[in-house]
Image (cartoon, grey):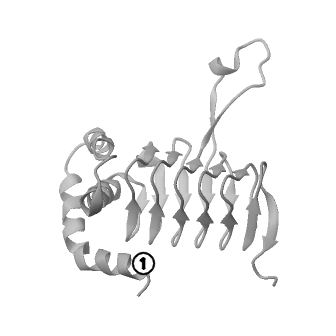
């Protein structure tokens, strides 16, 4: 049995308890739930994954089944994220959902990845860049996507189904279905449908 199946099996086994915990958390104000989510950022093991999942399920716009948020993930504005089923987000990821992030089902996000939904304005030459307004842009990662270690996904990007982002890539524009991209900025390396 492969590791993914074991993870799903474990989730199914304990799902009712985790859902009850999520419903319990749901009675607290959103600000308290977010603080608890931040408090448990570094909680290790199955306990940490279960607590973060239960809290995120009560915070996020939507959160599917079997979502694994590993220790050390910085998730800003978790109330502005949508996550599908069977998603894993590995340690040291930085995800800023201020402008809204949508992550589909069966997505694997490797360690050290950055996903943005905001960017600095810079067009006013008479004002310093740091003082210009922040632009919010929805970022979408569709179903069945694998994002390699230390990749960066910039605000407003859409990564379509079946795509792979190579380790260290910087994605600055949309990615079509079933493409493998890499580099800075990310370019198409290969079409998964071609042999």
Q: Residue 169: horizontal and vertical position, in percent?
A: 70, 53
* The N terminus: image quadrant: bottom left
Q: Residue 14: horizontal and vertical position, in percent?
A: 23, 74
User: Is 172 left, or right, of 115 in this rendering?
Assistant: right
Q: Residue 83: horizontal and vertical position, in percent?
A: 47, 62
Q: Which residue, given by chain and number where applicable, does mark 1 sit on?
A: 3
Picture residue at 63% right of the left edge, 44% below the top: 137
Q: Residue 16: horizontal and vertical position, in percent?
A: 21, 73
Q: Is residue 48 above or below residue 17?
A: above
Residue 86 found in image quarter: bottom left
Residue 33 found in image quarter: top left
Q: Nearer the viewer, residue 112 or 84?
A: 112
* The C terminus: image quadrant: bottom right
Which residue of the protein is positioned furthest toward the bottom in this rendering? 1
Q: Secondary structure at mark 1?
A: helix
Picture residue at 77% right of the left edge, 11% below the top: 126
Picture residue at 53% right of the left edge, 68% below the top: 107
Q: Is residue 39 above or below residue 120?
A: below
């Amino acid at each position: 049995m492969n590791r993914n199946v074991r993870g799903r099996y474990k989730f199914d086994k304990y799902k009712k308890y985790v859902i009850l915990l999520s419903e319990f958390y749901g009675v607290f104000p959103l600000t308290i739930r977010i603080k608890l989510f931040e408090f448990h950022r570094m909680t290790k093991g199955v306990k940490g994954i279960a607590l973060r999942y239960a809290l995120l399920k009560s915070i996020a716009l939507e959160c599917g089944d079997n979502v694994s948020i590993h220790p050390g993930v910085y998730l800003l504005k978790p109330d502005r994220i949508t996550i599908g089923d069977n998603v894993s987000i590995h340690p040291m990821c930085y995800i800023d959902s201020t402008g809204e992030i949508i992550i589909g089902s069966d997505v694997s996000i490797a360690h050290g990845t950055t996903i943005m939904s905001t960017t600095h304005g810079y067009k006013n030459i008479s004002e310093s860049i740091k003082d210009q307004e922040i632009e919010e842009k929805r970022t979408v990662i569709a179903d069945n996507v694998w994002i390699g270690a230390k990749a960066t996904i910039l605000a407003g990007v859409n990564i379509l189904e079946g795509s792979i982002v190579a380790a260290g890539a910087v994605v600055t524009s949309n990615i079509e279905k079933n493409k493998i991209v890499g580099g800075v900025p990310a370019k198409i390396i290969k079409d998964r449908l071609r042999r």
